[in-house]
Image (cartoon, rainbow, N blue to C red):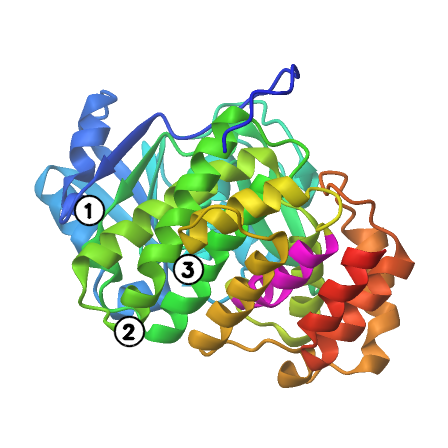
């Protein structure tokens, strides 16, 4: 499963430390003290739901008891916008913060990366869109996810919305110094969020495994992640109090994030074109795109896709199209939409989505060339959820 066939030079990055276990969120001060930050102001970036549920106190209270002064920025709502990012940057400059803790879903974690960076750098957020380097090192950053899927706690990426379109700030300085995985923070997640974030993790694993930039490091993470999701996502979805499933999924999401060192492929581009029209949770749009992305790449990497099918199906000799079917059936089992019609996108939207996918979100990492003609079939079959026709077309052409 792990390929050593390529002689390319690869670079991978991830958090310097990982703390994992039930109740680990209450031990963040141990990480700070390990970095010789024994007191001072700490900025906690969290979304409003985390604060509403009181989960932020799981981190803040022990920090305060240990002598830190915690300031909370809880202005993260849904998909973060440029305006939210700019407001957070301003907040991060108000005090001489010694460290930043990001707590919540992917949006909060992504924004915490910007808080750490812009606390020490004076520029505006728009000056750092795209791949970037900061003149001054960001503040020490700890990420504490409260969902299991985005993998943001392991990456160098911060996603935001600029004028209604997905944008990114990207650079190795944004990788958190440490990640804290506390499954107890996820046990109250509603089934819909469990499903969406879990499918996000699976998308990272499968897309990273299909990427032409896959390496032995990312293969290791991808294969483990897809095996975990195949075994534990449905149990977590069906019974949120199943702590073994919750522990598995929060770890699977983390290593799914490490898989992103390979880069994602066509699926994320398609997902962005969906989300730009109906503002679905990221994991839902990624889930919708995933089976069609696998179908699109069937002829380019059949052996690779068969290997992934073997893993999730627990057997040897699987046909590549069996992976497509398995993902499609999993989407149905989790109650997620599987056609564009279900999210009010029609065939009349297809030409604009194709153009946006090709022009705004190109994916040189995808193993099969991305062109408008082949994308036309992908989007047209997605409109009605006709995955069978998509498989037949891409296997034949």
Q: Classify mark 3: residues with Cα within 10 Å, few (<14), some (14-19) or many (20+).
A: many
129 vs 312, left or right, is right
Foreground: 117 or 387?
387
Residue 53 vs residue 306, the one in the foreground: 306
Judge the density around disc 2: few (<14), some (14-19), many (≥20) Cα neighbours within 10 Å: some
Q: Which residue is mark 3?
A: 198
Q: Is residue 189 visible?
A: yes
Residue bounds of the magenta highlight: 284-296
Horizontal and vertical percent position of residue 45: 37, 51
Mark pair 3, 1: CA separation: 21 Å
Q: Give me the residue at 18% from left, 67% from top.
A: 241
Secondary element at tag 1: helix
Q: CA distance from mark 2 to mark 3?
A: 13 Å
**Can you name the residue that lies furthest to the left here?**
65
Q: On residue 25, which mark appears?
A: 1
Closer to the chain start, of discs 2 and 3, is 3
Give percent across and percent down for residue 301: 69, 42
Left or right: 78 in relation to 61? right
Q: Which quadrant holds residue 246? A: bottom left
Q: Position of residue 130 (x, y in %)?
A: 69, 39
Which residue is labeled 2 in the image? 238
Is residue 92 visible in this depiction of the protein?
A: no
């Amino acid at each position: 499963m792990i390929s050593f066939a390529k002689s390319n030079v690869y670079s991978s990055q991830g958090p310097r430390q990982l703390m994992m276990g039930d109740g680990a969120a209450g031990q963040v001060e141990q990480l700070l003290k390990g970095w010789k930050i024994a007191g001072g102001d700490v900025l906690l970036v969290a979304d409003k739901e985390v604060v509403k549920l009181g989960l932020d106190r799981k981190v803040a209270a022990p920090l305060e008891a240990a002598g830190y002064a915690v300031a909370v920025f809880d202005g993260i709502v849904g998909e973060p916008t440029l305006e939210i990012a700019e407001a957070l940057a301003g907040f991060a400059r108000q005090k001489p913060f010694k460290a930043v803790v990001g707590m919540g879903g992917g949006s909060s974690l992504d924004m915490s990366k910007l808080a750490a960076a812009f606390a020490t750098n004076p520029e505006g957020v728009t000056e750092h869109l795209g791949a970037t380097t900061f003149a001054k090192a960001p503040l020490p950053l700890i990420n504490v996810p409260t969902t299991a899927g985005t993998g943001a706690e392991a990456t160098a990426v911060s996603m935001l919305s600029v004028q209604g379109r997905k944008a990114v700030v990207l650079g190795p300085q944004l990788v958190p110094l440490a990640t804290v995985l506390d499954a107890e923070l996820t046990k109250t997640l509603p089934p819909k969020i469990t499903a969406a974030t879990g499918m996000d993790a699976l998308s990272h694993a499968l897309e990273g495994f299909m990427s032409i930039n896959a390496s032995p490091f990312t293969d290791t993470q991808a294969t483990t992640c897809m095996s975990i999701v195949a075994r534990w996502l449905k149990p977590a979805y069906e019974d949120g109090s199943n702590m073994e499933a919750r522990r598995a999924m929060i770890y699977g999401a983390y290593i799914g994030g490490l898989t992103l060192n390979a880069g994602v492929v066509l699926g994320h581009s398609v997902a962005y074109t969906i989300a730009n029209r109906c503002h679905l949770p990221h994991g839902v749009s990624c889930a919708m795109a995933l089976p069609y992305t696998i179908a699109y790449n069937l002829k380019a990497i059949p052996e690779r896709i068969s290997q992934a099918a073997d893993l999730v199906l627990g057997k040897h000799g699987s046909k590549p199209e069996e992976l497509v079917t398995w993902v499609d059936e999993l989407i149905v089992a989790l109650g997620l939409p599987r056609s564009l019609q279900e999210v009010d996108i029609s065939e009349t939207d297809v030409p604009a989505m194709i153009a946006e996918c090709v022009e705004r979100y190109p994916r040189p990492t995808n193993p099969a060339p991305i062109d408008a003609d082949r994308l036309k079939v992908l989007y047209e079959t997605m409109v009605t959820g006709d995955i069978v026709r998509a498989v037949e077309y891409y296997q034949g052409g």
